[in-house]
Amino acid sequence: MKKLIYLLCLLAAGSHIYAQQGLTNAGRMQVHGGNFSVAGTFTNTSTASFTNNGALTIRGNLHNAQTGMTTGTGTLRMNGASAQQITGTQPWRTHHLITQNNAGVSLVNKLEVKGQHQFLAGIIQTSGTGYLQYGNDATYTGAADNRHVAGTVRKSGTIAFAFPVGNGTVYRPVELSSIQQQSTYEVRYGQAAPYTNQIHNGLVAVFPSEYWELQTISGGAAVPTLAWDHAKEAMPAWALSEVRVAQLAGTVWSDAGGSAVGNIAGQGSITAPSMLLSGLYTFGQKSAPLPLTLVSFTAKRSGDATMLAWQTVAEQGVERFAVERSNDGLHFTEIASLTARNRSSEQRYQWADATAINRVAYYRLRCIDLDGKVKMSQVVAVTDAVSNSLALVTNPVRHAAQIRVPVEMSGKYNYTITNAAGQVVQQGSVVLAGGGIATLALGQQVLPGVYFLKLTNGTQGQMLRFVRD
């Protein structure tokens, strides 16, 4: 296709120019108050100067190599009959944007919008280097299941914003608000949440069907609001009061708080506290009050087996008890299931785990009622009798770390607690009694998260990994 080379183009107000072929701008070009349509690909070269103060309509692809392109005051309309792309080495900047292509628009290069974006037709598909960036005052209208952004959206500024994201089939926006300083956030929607069997900090279940990836690129904290739509992704039959925001840090989901409103079997939302955003977020289920009292749950190593025992009273409507085991205190697997007796009197249960222990094993009890509600026991730990290593009695840890001390470790030890980034958050000394249990109180600076505890006495040292609730 023959291309038209524009060195200078000043369009007067009210005029309409239609380029029936592709167009390459290598000089100075301005759309001023008029309508300018390009049927083919519009290429803006590295030597060009382009400003759109009118209405620019592109039916082919859009390519930009101009450094420092100005936003202008005009509107860019993408309304091709076949799939379109925005490519190049430099961002394409526009004040207003209209996307009106049923075949969709792919962003191979970054597209920046300062004013209003109208979703009229089609999906915007982003890539690793090409994403949609909204400015502080940017707004949009018309987003729906068949017209939204499937991929990454960024927003800069301080104004609350509902990100128009989805997966190309369903529209699933998420809102960030209460932004106290100039910030940039990145949002992406996904389905099939990972690691949903790896939970702690009071959660008993994580919604497996969808998630949002939220990142603070620069600036400060924000308040995230996640919304569900049972018709699009069916929510489990959780009580509204049990719904929380679940956050994935690393490979473990934890409770990020929040208060839910709406209808579980319809539509609703949950707003979490203000936070720096980092990771994946979805809906979680908090442990619920059950019609039973769990009096105790213990684990004791006896020979080559671990004897697990628990005691209840006032059982009513309880379906079963699931015994779960972990080798690290974080990732649990169900190893046994016992049917509940549902008697009001005191009931005692036992289970023997004959699996070998590699230094330490952690156990917890999941109590499940007939309506699917779940209550979790505390985590208990057992150690191999011949182990010469430290082990945590319970993990996660809340106020203090209780440590099983091997017989050969006695006396005064120096300790340091470092976070996942390697920063020391607490240090001091502790006296260990060989063969007993030492208690190490955690300061307020040890925030919820993953930590490493190292103890040394000049001749020997050991390290433990723990999670603070």
Image: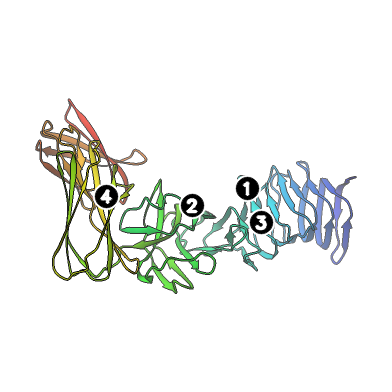
Can residue 218 be seen by looking at this rendering?
A: no
Q: Are marks 1 and 3 in contact (CB under 8 Å)?
A: no
According to the picture, the residue beneath numbered tag 2 turns out to be 215
Q: Quadrant of the N terminus?
A: top right
Question: Please, what secondary structure does the residue beneath circle 1 have?
Answer: loop
Give me the residue at 61% from left, 56% from top.
Answer: 150
User: Residue 396 got which mark?
Assistant: 4
Q: Amino acid at mark 1?
A: Ser
Nearest the eye: 26 or 266: 266
Q: How many marks?
A: 4
- Residue 259 on image: x %, y %: 38, 68
- Residue 429 on image: x %, y %: 16, 38
| Cα separation between marks 1 and 3 | 10 Å
Nearest the eye: 293 or 68: 293
Q: Are marks 1 and 4 in contact (CB under 8 Å)?
A: no
| Cα separation between marks 1 and 4 | 38 Å
Seen in the image, is 267 located left or right of residue 427? right
Q: Earlier in the sequence, mark 1 or mark 4?
A: 1
Q: Amino acid at mark 4?
A: Pro
Seen in the image, is 224 located left or right of residue 469? right
According to the picture, the residue beneath numbered tag 1 turns out to be 127
Give me the residue at 44% from left, 71% from top.
Answer: 264
Q: Nearer the viewer, mark 4 or mark 2?
A: 4
